[in-house]
Image: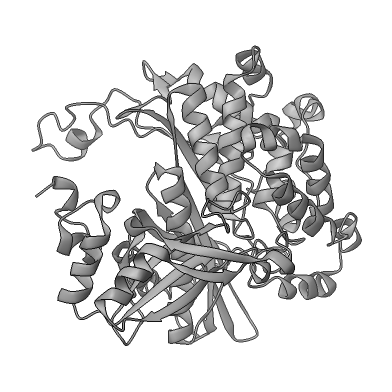
Amino acid sequence: MDNTLNLNPNKVVQFLKKVPDQIRKTDLIRFVKENGIRMINFMYPADDNRLKTLNFVINSEEYLDSILTYGERVDGSSLFPFIEAGNSDLYVIPRYATAFVDPFAEIPTLTMLASFFNKEGLPLHSSPEYTLRKACESFHEVTGMDFYAMGELEYYVISEDTGLFHANDQKGYHESAPYAKFNDFRVECMNLIAESGGQIKYGHNEVGNFTIDGMIYEQNEIEFLPVPAQLAADNLMIAKWIIRTLAAKKGYDVTFAPKITAGKAGSGLHIHFKIMKGNRNMMTENGVLSDIAKKAIVGILEHADAITAMGNKVPTSYFRLVPHQEAPTSICWGDRNRSVLVRVPLGWTGENDMCSIANPLENDCISTPPQKQTVELRSADCSADIYQLIAAMVVAARTGFEMENALDRADDLYVSVNIHNDENKEKLAQLKSLPDSCVASAKALAGQREIFEERGIFSPQLIDGIIAKLSSFNDGDLRESLSGKPEEMMEIVRKYWHCG
């Protein structure tokens, strides 16, 4: 058996003894027949950035073959505002590589993510999932390399306070039981996400925790492994669905909202990326950040204000993006610096054998460098359309390779220490700031839309829809007008409690 399959928790992969992208229709029919599967589910994202579900009862092998081959019709106008009701029929076609056994279904059910196709049987040009696919193909055409991504999925779990073992307010980072109350819930979520195909790196408690009105609010994080960009988006979409569904079954509330109350840590969706050429990570060269990495960083920074239109889609997104917290406000980058927009975290580039130092009985643990270096965009949150967000990052990164002065710009935008330190006042004044509202993000996207529409990646209809939706919030001065008014701010927060 392929070593990549030995410990794979996905039941479909284990049964078929195939990596996901090698799964065929005949494989799924065999799995259904030999595992007592009675239903098929298609899931697909809509404009509200949540997965929708279409259920099928398996009536016969012929019907099963038809579902897997031809998919089904859906009403596109009910899913996306840029589709007119008079010509709204779309097809949804399953992607076999995404198949998993539904962990919540009482009736044995096989679930797959599906792609949208138009009346001619071609991929829907404006579909967020297809937009990401086009962005990745274009990136490869221009650079000869591939864009990998992974998300840090932060969320709060809310339940009744038992009164036992309170953690210190806003000091929950990596807390253990009994001070952490929802570790078991997080671990169960992680297991189900892995069984559903998610490539998880780790999970832990995050900094945010507090108690209000007899309810405990505890922030958690599940971080994923870097995988090809489309798979990274799929992983995050399925993970959000699993976390919410399991929480509902246990009687917990869960929110991915960017801000949930004044003075407490908000939740972001940090997206790490790396650039691969074959099996080689191109982010470092001779133990330091490579020019390739710097060009990609600069491309993203040059279009960071427009990227917020894909990654920060509700007014409360901009309650989180304020100075002097760990969320970024200025468009710059740095090493291990949590005040910057793009951060270069530790990447295992040192020469010391830490494993052998920690474990004296081990001799030379390291045979080859681990090639783990990634770079992190810290602005987005879970109001994002994840496919649009990562597609925008891929497009922007590609432009960095098309800029003659990219490396000079990398030097200009680099910050060595906390940007808000007094010593950096002059530097801070030279840097552009992120948008402070949905309206400002829409304006930034409108001014740069040609970059994203180039090569047919983001369709004009999709860009029009994003701009119209963001502009409709009319929140240009909302953050300023609610300053010092926590009760009014909370009314807005509650409105977007279950965004994305």
* Residue closest to the eye, 432 or 100: 100
* Residue closest to the eye, 9 or 170: 9
Quick check: can you spot residue 93? yes
Q: Position of residue 394 (x, y in %)?
A: 55, 36
Q: Residue at x 60, y 23 (%)?
A: 400
Q: Residue at x 75, y 58 (%)?
A: 319
Quadrant, the C terminus: bottom right
User: Is the residue 325 above or below the residue 15 in the image?
Assistant: above
User: Is the residue 473 above or below the residue 397 in the image?
Assistant: below
Q: Residue at x 39, y 43 (%)?
A: 226
Relative to 285, 344 lies left or right: right
* Residue closest to the eye, 12 or 437: 12
Relative to 388, 106 lies left or right: left
**Toward which corner of the image does residue 114 lie, by quadrant?**
bottom left
Q: Residue at x 31, y 84 (%)?
A: 59
Q: Position of residue 309 (x, y in %)?
A: 72, 49
Q: How is the image coloured?
A: one colour
Q: Position of residue 361 (x, y in %)?
A: 8, 38
Quick check: can you spot residue 187? no
Q: Position of residue 442 (x, y in %)?
A: 80, 48
User: Is the residue 492 above or below the residue 94 in the image?
Assistant: below
Relative to 235, 417 lies left or right: right
**Toward which corner of the image does residue 428 lie, by quadrant?**
top right
User: Is the residue 331 above or below the residue 325 in the image?
Assistant: above
**Toward which corner of the image does residue 98 lie, by quadrant?**
bottom left
